[in-house]
Amino acid sequence: MIKATINGGRQLTIDSNSIDGLERAIELVQVGENNYSLLLDNVSYNAQMVSYNKEEKKLVLLVNGNEYEVSIKDKTDILLQEMGINVTSVAKHNLFKAPMPGLIRTIVATEGQAVKKGDVILILEAMKMENALKSPADLVVKNIKVQQGQAVEKNQLLIEFE
């Protein structure tokens, strides 16, 4: 299941054969590098992916000549949002805190390392899922406050940035 927000307003919940809970005949076929043929309830649409930002999960589509900006949330994004968690948020004082309780599986970043926005800085296991926590901006790691294998609580300080 994914949730899509179109042009910042209209929201859709899409499953393999339904849109907003209504059964639909959906077929999507890639016909070129960024071109797709969409068959929805026996009506054909030509779609072209104009741009895609993987980190922000946003894309711009051109469908039958009309441009649409689409933001996408997958099951993990939806679950974290329902819990009131924004994995990419950092406090004003450059503190990176645990978005949920869990276990530090892997620490990817090192102290003194310059990280780019979207770089994985550590892996947190929570609710039997591994969550790749990413840098919210271009920053330098000042101090790592946790160790691999350590259990952490929600809002516990994990990393300080310069």
Image (cartoon, grey):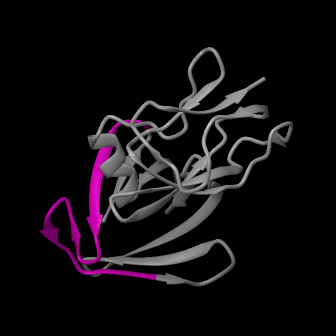
Whether residue 65 appears in this view of the structure is no
Residue 9 part of the magenta-drawn span:
yes
Q: Nearer the viewer, residue 124 or 151?
A: 151
Q: Is residue 95 left or right of residue 27?
A: right
Q: Quadrant of the C terminus?
A: top right
Residue at the limit of the structure toward the left, as seen here: 22
Q: Is residue 36 magenta?
A: no
Residue 122 at x, y percent in the picture? 62, 51
Q: Which residues are magenta?
A: 8-28
Q: Residue at x 32, y 34 (%)?
A: 84
Q: Nearer the viewer, residue 41 or 99?
A: 99
Residue 140 seen by the camera = yes
Residue 105: image location, x then y, percent? 55, 60
Coordinates of residue 65 in the picture (x, y in percent): 54, 57
Is residue 161 shown above or below 58? above
Vertical position of residue 35 compared to residue 160: above or below: below
Residue displayed at 39% across by 42% down: 100
Give the quarter of the figure containing the N terminus: bottom left
Q: Determine the residue positioned at 28% across, 40% down.
A: 83
